[in-house]
Image (spheres, grey):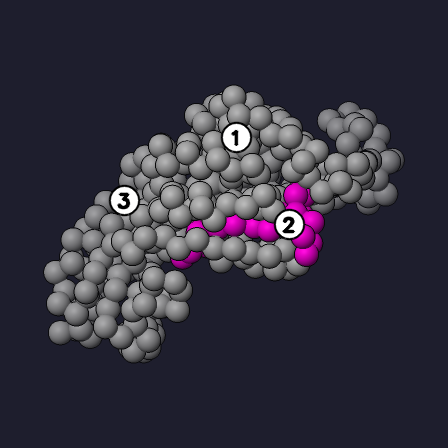
Amino acid sequence: MRHLNLEYWLRPNILNMKPYSSARDEYSGADMIFLDANENPFETALNRYPDPKQGLLKEKISDLLGVHPEQLFIGNGSDEAIDLLIRASCQPSQDRVLSISPSYGMYQVCAEIQGVAFDKVLLNNDFSFNTDRIKTAIHPSHKLLFLCSPNNPTGNTISRADLVQILETFGGVVVVDEAYIDFSETAGFLELLSSFENLVLLRTFSKAWGLAGIRCGIALSNSKIISILSKIKYPYNLNTLTQKMVVEALGKPESYKNQVELIIQERELLVNELSLIDGILEVYPSQANFVLIKVKDAHQLYGLLLKEEIVVRNRSSQDLCEGCLRLTIGTPNENQKVLKTLQKLLS
Ligand SMILES: *Cc1c(COP(=O)(O)O)cnc(C)c1O
C-alpha cells in the first residue's frame, strides 16, 4: 500500500478548517416539520434544498462501480473535482501542477485561476505516454499530476505498468481522468485504488451517459481524500434535478449500453473509412468517442466544414497536433454525412 501524508499534501488552511454545516446536514427524510433552513414551506417538487450528502445518488453509483460510498465525490461536472483538488492541495505561487500535453485544457485553466504554476510533459510523437520523461519532470513542488486515459484529444490510453511506475514515483496525488473509459476496451484503473492512496480517478455522466446538460461528474479515491473534497465543496453543489436525473438514468442502463456499443461500432467504421480518403494524412486509433485526424491544412478544412454546417474541433495549435482536427462520433446519419463531405472536400 502506497500511503499519502495529508499533512504534507494539503494546504495548511484546508487541513485545519471546519466546514460550513448546513441545516440539512443534520436531519433529512420525510415526516418531519422542517423549520430549519428558511425554505418556502409550500410544496412544489423543488421548494427544499437538495441532499448535501447526495446519499441516494452515492448509493446507486457505488453499486454501479463496486466501490464504497465513502470513496465517491460527486460534483457539478468532473470539472468541479479538478478545481477542488487544486484548491485543496496547491498553495498559490508556491506549489505546482504537472500534466501531459496535449491533453484536456481544464487542468491548466483551473491551476492558473488559483495562481498555481502548471508544468507539462510532452507525449511522444505518436502520442504514447513517455513515462521516463514524466518521471524526470517530477519535482517536490508538484502536488498533483493530471493524466487522462483515454486521453483527450489523442484517444490513446496509458498502460497499467506505466501508471504503476508513476504512482510509485510521485509524492503528490496522481489524477487519472477517465471521462472516456466507457468507450475503451481497457477497464480503467479502479482496481489500483486499494493499493495507492495517492490515486484519484475522474468519471463523468457527460459523455457515455448522455447527460452533459445536467452537470454531474465523479471523483473516486480513498475516504481520506474524498472527505477533504466533501469538506470544501459548496454544500448544495448538486441540485435536486441533477440528482434525480442521474438516479433515473442508473435505473435503466440499457439505452446507455446500447448507445455506447453503437458509438464504438461507428467509431471503427469511421476510422476505416477516413483512412481511405487521400487528403487525410493520418487517422489516429481511438479508445474514446472521437477520432483525431491529421490533414495538410487544418484551418482551411475547418472553415470548409463549417460552410457545410459541420462543426469539428480544430486542435492544430496544441502541442504535437499540427494539422489535427478532432471529430466526435455522431449518429450513423451524421457520420455518413461527414464522410461524404470530407470525400468531396479533400479529393
Ligand atoms: C469532457 C471531458 C470531461 C467532462 O467534464 P464534465 O465537467 O464532467 O462535463 C472531463 N475530462 C475530459 C478529459 C473531458 O474530455
Q: Is residue 132 above or below residue 7?
A: below
Tag on residue 264?
A: 3
SS for dot 1: helix
**Which residue is under mark 1?**
61
Measured as percent of width and height from the top left, residue 332 is found at 25, 54
Q: Does residue 286 show up? A: yes
Cβ atoms at labels 3 and 1 below 8 Å apart: no
User: Which disc number belongs to residue 167?
Assistant: none
Which of the two marks, 3 or 2, is nearer to us in this view?
A: 2
Along the polypeptide, which appears first: circle 3 or circle 1? Answer: 1
Q: Amino acid at mark 2?
A: Asp
Residue 287 against residue 307 in the figure, above or below: above
| Magenta residues (range) | 86-104
Indicate the secondary structure of the residue bearing disc 3.
Answer: helix
Q: Is mark 1 within 8 Å of ligand 1?
A: no
Residue pointed to by mark 2: 95
Residue positioned 44% across, 37% down in the render:
166
In the image, residue 285 lies at what x, y percent?
Answer: 24, 50
Is 66 included in the stretch rendered in magenta?
Answer: no
